[in-house]
Image: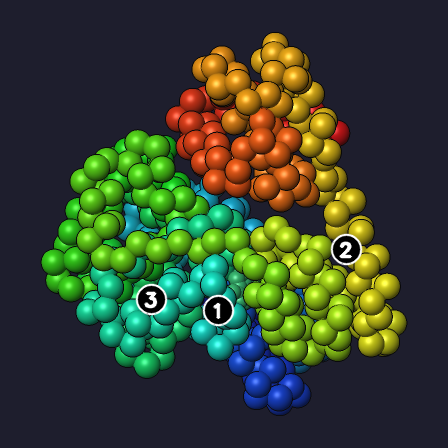
Amino acid sequence: MVGTSAVSDSERDFILKGVLSTIKEIVTAQQFDMWFSCLRVSSVTGSSITFVAPNSFIREWLNSHYNDLFSSAVYKVLNSSREIIFSTEEEVFGQLSSVSFAPGEVFPGKRSHEENYTAPLYKYYSFENFVAGPCNRLAHAAAIAVSESPGLAYNPLFIHGASGLGKTHLLHAINNILLSKHRMKTLYLPCERFINHYISTIRTNSWDSFRSFYRNIDALLIDDIQAFENSQGSREEFFHTFNTLYNAKRQIVITSDCPPESIAALEDRLISRFKWGLLCSIDNTSRETRIAIAEKKASLWGINLSHEAASYLAKNVTGSIRELEGAIARLSREEKITKNSIALDRVRKIVWELSGNKKYVSIEKVIKAVSERFNVRVSQLQSRCRTRSLALPRQIAMHLSRKLTRMSLMEIGGYLGGRDHSTVIHADEKITKMSRKDKNLHITLQKLESELRK
Ligand code: ADP
Ligand code: MG
């Protein structure tokens, strides 16, 4: 049945079901729900089989803990051995996005429309596994309200915040409830996929099927809509989709890495529609929330992390939760190898290694690089002088310092003219927004950043 070329969808499903039913006999029901039920098979060849996990942490976990189990389950189903490859939605989607659609197809791989509605339940991304704190309380509460009363509570619900702070997690958590409790026909999709579908439809001219695909659903959950920035036609099409769904009281949930008005080129009519419902942000997490998240993740992953170790992680891994999760994934791998409970010095070592990879930069270095690039003196950047020719470089220095150094907002403000933290936030947001619109500025920032990280 399985040659060196890819197999059909139904064969893939058959193999997946067979493998999962073998695994189900071995692991506990809770483990099965958490780690295995959300898997898909993306390809089967004569030598390998690729399983797709919702994120890199589940992939990592399966790879380090269950590779042998998968090998033997696959052997049982196919009667011959295969290399087991674990991949993520993002990786597979990244590959697929470069593949064009055949006429009449929705997504590559000859899937029927019906199949695409039934996104799997991602138990990992559940409300139970989401830690609420001051940074995300409103978004969390709104997401629960929407999942309890879809179409009625807040419509649309628009959640924005920097990368890795839990937007996709909340989107799936809502989707899980809409699917399991309300038995709705929902569509979760990254915005990129909408855009790719739009582009392929231009070629095939199959607008009827495009439109009916998006309009005959009970709920639309669209992730990362900042991607609309570069695609006017798809924005236009989305506008009509939005109106149709909204008028039919279908729930719409949207995420973006910035507020709607900061998405360059987004038309006012779309911005105002996004504001019809509830707009909420997820902000940077506090240390307490990060401790709670570290402890939650450790218990989900079944690793023994002391409160002291969790606090150390939370204090030192201060970027996105994705990084915190990455550190815990590393710890879980080490624990498996050493079979020891995790000692604080192990945690220290991992944090040190992780920050070594990231290379934090000193603020002095940032200020010097900006002064050279914009031909102003370091002392001018650090002065209180407010002339226009200094304002922009100073704001750029604040933006880069926030991104590249470990300094607090207060400290950054202190270094750059004795400004307070709100001035630094304002400068950072302004430069982020400007660089979306101004290509030259964008390139300048990228160059500065890569020189500084060297
Ligand atoms: P975003 O979509 O905002 O970039 P994700 O939703 O992908 O971020 O989150 C990145 C990772 O961090 C996910 O694995 C998610 O489970 C985890 N995460 C983020 N915020 C929280 C939280 N408050 N509680 C538990 N896990 C979280
Ligand atoms: Mg996301």
Residue neighbourhood size for the residue with mark 3, other residues' Cα within 10 Å, grouped as few (<14), some (14–19), many (≥20)? many
Q: Going from the N terminus, do you reach mark 3 or mark 2 first?
A: 3
The secondary structure type at the circle numbered 1 is loop
Q: Earlier in the sequence, mark 1 or mark 2?
A: 1
Marker disc for residue 196? none
Residue 327 location, quadrant: bottom right
Secondary structure type for disc 2: helix
Q: Which residue is mark 2?
A: 351
Query: To which residue does mark 1 refer?
Result: 132
Q: How is the image coloured?
A: rainbow
Amino acid type indicated by mark 3: Ala
Q: Secondary structure at mark 3?
A: helix
Res. 135 visible in picture: yes
Q: Is residue 392 above or below residue 408?
A: above
Relative to residue 215, is residue 338 depicted above or below? below
Residue 22 visible here: no
The location of residue 142, given as percent across then percent down, is 33, 66
Question: Which numbered disc flags the more N-terminal residue, 3 or 1?
Answer: 1
Numbered circles on residues, count: 3
Q: Amino acid at mark 2?
A: Val
Return the x and y of residue 243 as percentages of the image width and height: 15, 51
Q: Is ligand 1 closer than 8 angstroms to the Cβ of mark 1?
A: yes
Q: What is the C-alpha distance between the residues marked 1 and 2?
A: 24 Å
The residue wearing badge 3 is 142
x and y, in percent, of residue 148 in the image? 29, 76
Residue sitting at x 25%, y 49%? 274
Label 2 Cα neighbours within 10 Å, binned few <14 / some 14-19 / many ≥20: many
Of residues 230 and 267, the one drawn nearer to the viewer in this rendering: 267
Camera-nearest label, 1 or 2: 1
Q: Residue furthest left?
A: 247
- Please say if 173 is above or below 189: below
